[in-house]
Amino acid sequence: MSQARLTSCLPLPLDNKVLVNVIEKAKDWALMHGVGMRDKNHFTKDAIQIAPFVLLPSPFPRTEFAKAIELQPILNELMHKVAHDEEFLESTLQNALQVDEFTAKLYDVWVKVRSEGITQSLCLGLFRSDYLMQQPDRNRIKQVEFNTIASSFGAITSNLPAMFRYVLRQLGHGELIKHMPENRALSGLCSGIIEAYDLFGVPSAVVLFVVEEVSYNICDQRFHEFEISEKRPDIIIYRKTLNEIYDETQLNDKKQLILEGQPVAVVYYRSGYEPAQYPSTKEWDARLRVERSTAIKCPSIQYQLAGTKKVQQALAAPGVLEKFMGGGNSTGRVRDIFTGLYSLDFDDNGERAVEMALADADRFVLKPQREGGGNNLYGGDVRDALLRMRHSRERAAYILMERILPPLVSAYVVRPGAQVPPPLTDVVSELGIFGVIIGSKDKILCNKQVGHMLRTKLAEANEGGVAAGLGALDSPFLLDL
Ligand SMILES: Nc1ncnc2c1ncn2[C@@H]1O[C@H](COP(=O)(O)OP(=O)(O)OP(=O)(O)O)[C@@H](O)[C@H]1O
Ligand SMILES: [Mg+2]
């Protein structure tokens, strides 16, 4: 099917000289406001380079944007309930656990912690629900996935409306600024960490960010630290890898996680979501120690498990949303954002899904229980993988998802080291809405929507991870269609 197009905020192409000039300004704006990343090819802590961004904000239908924002607290609560339903998580994940070692290890941590008795009933979620517009369905949003761990780019993208305001003014189109919503994701996400810190209630306590060995996405992470430090000078933040946590923390007799002599109030994971981040048993031991402790975890292990693709697929099965949400209006609204999601378990339903995908592989995406991008299979690879796994239990580690077909937009993508001016290319945009939730099994203390991000990728690319170098940072330009 050919993909329809949304109109760009300005008639394109731009005049070449104007384009070169405004890109130079935009790059400097980006660099000087932390729209940046560390260079993967020539890593140094002394420099950042621009993060890939689009020169102009991409169009997004206003009503769909508003819908995504309204749904966020509803989705936060849904995922909170799912995470606290032990039976549901167990029955949903059981087949995947047999064949997916990583999810099984996370699950084991959760089982151990529960068997010892939960020391911290509160969880902190800094979530992001991602959407693509489904062009054949009047550009209505469909959920790509729900991220419960290390949901990134809230910080950098909070700066983007200001960058686009500057760019539009330089191009003589300040009148368009009113179509761009403000984005307060950074302050909203940080308010969640601060609120959790205060709920912990120990004045000398510290906050711990769990980070990768090398943080390329340093700006996004550091902005959280700067924001918290500005709002709450009393809160000390440490950045540690899981390996360092193994060496430098202890549990005391009250099960407090002690770092540099102080109890840790909040642990915010910006790492720990993929197998490569646990290269040895030390990292798993560190993870278990953190989960055993009284620190408020963001996310708790059960939030992380609730964020698996398998759970997303199970929620789309008949009657499941009703079980968690009742039969009201909100349930229908959530169901509307789901696209076809199918289990590949080793049973009749799974068999039917395999048949369906083999008959028309281009209509589907095959997803393992992974985060961080680059793990999904598309098109011919779906077919090959299903043919290979058809008679093996291994297939239960995957889910099958209908492929969403978003509308095209024309854009200039500005990348570090790339030719200027860049070609005008066809891109598609993915919206992420950030949510904050704090609560225990029986009580939700905070639940809100706090901001958004848009990332845009070349139309022919399957995935658009910005940190992976495939996507570009963006901000919505709201259209009244
Ligand atoms: N059903 C789909 N239809 C079209 N594109 C999809 C679909 N599912 C995923 N994608 C593309 O693949 C990307 C990665 O998919 P997904 O978000 O499920 O994986 P992930 O590894 O959890 O990524 P992330 O690092 O963003 O959390 C999405 O951002 C989107 O561009
Ligand atoms: Mg994800």
Image (cartoon, helix red, strand yellow):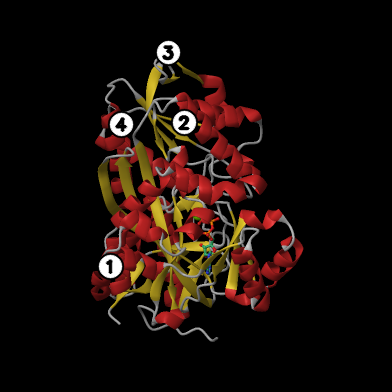
Q: Hey, what amino acid is under mark 2?
A: Arg
The tag earlier along the polypeptide, 2 or 3, is 2
Number of on-image labels: 4
Residue 197: assigned label = 4
Q: CA distance from mark 1 to mark 4?
A: 31 Å
Which three-letter amino acid code belongs to the residue tagged 3? Asp
Sequence-wise, the earlier of marks 2 and 4 is 2
Foreground tag (1 vs 3): 3
Is residue 333 shown above or below 405? above
Q: Residue at x 35, y 78 (%)?
A: 9
Mark 1 vs mark 3, CA separation in Å: 48 Å
Which one is in front, 356 or 29?
356
Can you give x and y, in whole percent of width and height, for residue 233 in the image?
27, 30
Q: Is residue 476 above or below residue 185?
A: below
Is residue 135 left or right of 343 when viewed as pictured? left
Residue 460, can we see it?
A: no
Label ID, residue 253: 3
Residue neighbourhood size for the residue with mark 2, other residues' Cα within 10 Å, grouped as few (<14), some (14–19), many (≥20):
few
> In the rendered image, which residue does mark 1 sit on?
66
Type of residue at label 4? Tyr
Task: Please tell me which residue lies in front, 198 or 289.
Answer: 289
